[in-house]
Image (cartoon, rainbow, N blue to C red):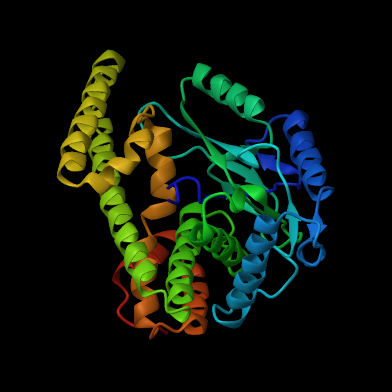
């Protein structure tokens, strides 16, 4: 299955920080990590034409070439050299993202960079460094959450390589990663992480469905649709829980009272999940995620990737399921001020 956070990408932030990025060490690890990664690239065409290479890998990379062509031809995503080279990792994730939020707010901390704008996470190529920074933020009073990232994107600034971590979870997940990352290259709104991630997730889902349908894999289409339904149910559960936390934070309690009430809500969220998963055993797959701290950073992180997805899917339908029209309308919406942008996503009844 595709983990809810596992689908996230890390945009390599190779440019000078504007604000919120405090150390030369971070800048150095971003650059050195990126160039260490791309120094290991092999052209996929060379691998698949080498009979001495592992047969399973060749089969996987042949699929990637098919997916890459499908993405450009059918999904109208950028036709470039991204995901036409391969890197074998010696670790399960390429980077680890650190999310942070105030103790009594689920609004994620932002880190700002030139060109890409502000993003709601800080990515590290080294897990130890990521956890160290998370501990530092925790010591400052922030809620923190660290998530491993299997996929990698430079938002089109460089040709992103396919990673072994993008192949480890089956064909459908590989397709999802590729479509998601190319969607970021198709469109990226500087400084609005929720808009960008929801758009890319919507394109990812649409792409996987169309790819399976093209291959007449009807049973897998149904299983994938069922999986999306379960993911939506769980995402709505998390959203409702997050709303309850936000209502709590509106009260003017003292710190001790607020902390106690917050712990009560966390316990209540775990209880409700136990009931939900007992009624729907497919929801039980999220038990590992629920075993996390369930703090503001974790809740904010999942909302970042999921909350606006239904609105983008609805707009795709309004555009007659035509991706070119959909992309064009998304660009129009992105030009609006933030509040009007979100309202339009939720309420528009026409594709302009």
* Residue 154 in which image quadrant: bottom right
For residue 307, side relative to residue 183 (left or right): left
Foreground: 231 or 281? 281
Count of number-bearing discs: 0
| Residue located at (54% from left, 64% from top) | 175
Tell me residue 22's x, y (percent).
69, 30
For residue 278, side relative to residue 149 (left or right): left
Tell me residue 114's x, y (percent).
70, 51
Tell me residue 192's x, y (percent).
51, 55
Assign the C terminus to one quadrant of the image: bottom left
Please, which residue is most extreme toward the top here? 256
Q: Is residue 228 above or below residue 301?
A: below
Residue 317 is at least partly visible in this image = yes
Foreground: 218 or 285? 218
Foreground: 133 or 110? 133
* Residue 288 in which image quadrant: top left
| Residue located at (30% from left, 55% from top) | 232
Residue 106 is at least partly visible in this image = no
| Residue located at (40% from left, 45% from top) | 302
């Amino acid at each position: 299955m595709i983990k809810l956070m596992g689908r996230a990408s890390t945009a390599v932030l190779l440019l000078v920080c504007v604000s919120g990025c405090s150390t030369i060490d971070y800048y150095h690890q971003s650059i050195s990590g990126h160039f260490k990664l791309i120094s290991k690239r092999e052209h996929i065409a060379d691998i698949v034409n080498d009979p001495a290479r592992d047969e399973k890998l060749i089969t996987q990379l042949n699929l990637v070439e098919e997916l890459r062509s499908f993405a450009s031809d059918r999904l109208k995503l950028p036709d470039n050299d991204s995901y036409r080279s391969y890197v074998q990792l010696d670790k399960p994730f390429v980077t680890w993202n650190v999310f942070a939020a105030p103790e009594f707010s689920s609004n994620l901390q932002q880190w700002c960079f030139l060109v890409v704008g502000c993003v709601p996470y800080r990515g590290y190529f080294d897990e130890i460094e990521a956890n160290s920074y998370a501990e530092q933020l925790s010591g400052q009073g922030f809620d923190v959450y660290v998530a491993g990232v299997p996929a990698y994107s430079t938002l089109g600034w460089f040709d992103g390589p396919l990673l072994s971590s993008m192949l480890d979870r089956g064909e459908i997940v590989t397709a999802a990663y590729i479509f998601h990352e190319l969607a970021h290259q198709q469109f990226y709104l500087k400084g609005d992480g929720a808009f960008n991630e929801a758009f890319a997730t919507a394109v990812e889902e649409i792409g996987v469905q169309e790819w399976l349908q093209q291959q007449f894999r009807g049973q897998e289409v149904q299983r994938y649709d069922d999986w999306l339904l379960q993911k939506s149910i769980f995402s709505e559960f998390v959203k409702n829980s997050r709303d309850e936390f936000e209502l709590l934070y509106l009260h003017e309690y003292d710190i001790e009272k607020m902390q106690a009430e917050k712990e009560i809500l966390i316990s209540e969220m775990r209880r409700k999940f136990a009931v939900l998963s007992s009624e729907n055993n497919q929801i039980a797959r999220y038990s590992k995620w629920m075993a996390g701290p369930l703090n503001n950073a974790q809740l904010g992180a999942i909302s970042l990737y999921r909350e606006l997805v239904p609105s983008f899917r609805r707009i795709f339908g309004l555009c007659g399921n035509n991706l070119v029209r959909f992309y064009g309308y998304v660009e129009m919406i992105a030009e609006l001020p933030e509040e009007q942008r979100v309202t339009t996503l939720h309420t528009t009844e026409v594709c302009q």
